[in-house]
Amino acid sequence: MDRQQWDEWYSGTEFEWLMRPNQFVAAQLAGLPPGRALDLAAGGGRNSVWLAEQGWSVTAVDFSRAGLEKGRKLSAARGVAARQVDWVVADLSEYEPARASFDLVLIAYLQVDAALRDRVLAGAAAALVPGGTLLVVGHDLANLTEGVGGPQSPEVLYTPEAITAGLPELRILRAERARRTVERDGGQATAIDTLVRAERPAG
């Protein structure tokens, strides 16, 4: 979807799940000592706000003003100090994060073609300080045939192999397909995501 479509989506129905962090984000990052975090494709800000609640100083980047406005409202409702999250409206096709500036970079459900995704991954890796963590979560290609929901275009779907190939400078700690339970039509169903956790070597 383009910027206008995302703005319309975020301006629409209040989705209760937008209030909670992604389950893989919470599970993977809960134990990290807080520092500076960059949330690329922050969307409605649920992960950014959660990180701020854990003590992180967060830069949240997305091209949807409506999505980030939702994040601001969620942040205020949760009592997160305004200075803890910097909400940045920017298109990731143009945005370049500062190099060696972040202890954590998060990319969750960025839905773009492979060429732009690889550019974003390269920028994310370069933005990490030595010892910094990168977490990437996205709809997996296998979700088309084995899961439910998510984009139906293979061009924007992930595989662990494709993500790790885009991170040659980092140490891969985890690269797998992960199953996520979702509510669908009054019952529960399974979605399949790619999950990759990596770090920049300390020396």
Image: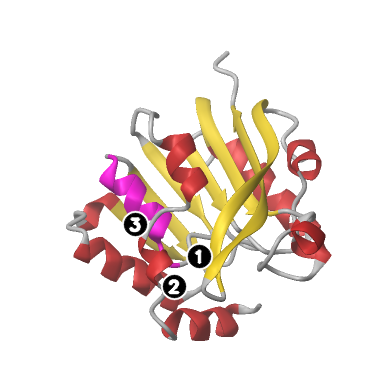
Disc 1 to disc 2, C-alpha distance:
8 Å
Q: Amino acid at mark 2?
A: Gly
Q: For residue 162, what is the image quadrant?
A: top right
User: In x, y percent, where is residue 187?
Assistant: 54, 68
Q: Amino acid at mark 3?
A: Asp
Element type where label 3 sits in the image = strand
53 drawn magenta: yes
Q: Which residue is mark 1?
A: 62
Look at discs 1 and 2 and give the one toward the viewer.
2
Marks 1/2 in contact by CB < 8 Å: the verdict is: yes
Q: Amino acid at mark 1?
A: Asp
User: In x, y percent, where is residue 184?
Assistant: 57, 71
Q: Which quarter shows the C terminus?
A: top right
Look at discs 3 and 2 and give the one toward the viewer.
2
User: In x, y percent, where is residue 200?
Assistant: 59, 26
Q: Examine the rendered structure and indicate whether residue 160 appears above or below residue 73.
A: above
| Nearer the observer, 178 or 171 | 178
Q: For residue 167, what is the image quadrant?
A: top right
Disc 3 to disc 1, C-alpha distance:
11 Å
Pointer 1 or 2: first along the chain = 1
Identify the residue at horizontal 68%, vertical 43% (top origin).
Answer: 122
Pointer 3 or 2: first along the chain = 2
Q: Crowding at label 1, few (<14), some or many (≥20) Cα neighbours within 10 Å?
A: many
Q: Which residue is mark 3?
A: 86
Element type where label 2 sits in the image = helix
**Label for residue 67?**
2
Pointer 3 or 1: first along the chain = 1
User: In x, y percent, where is residue 121?
Assistant: 67, 46
Marks 3/1 in contact by CB < 8 Å: the verdict is: no
Q: Which residues are the magenta region?
A: 44-54
Residue 77 in the figure: left or right of residue 178? left
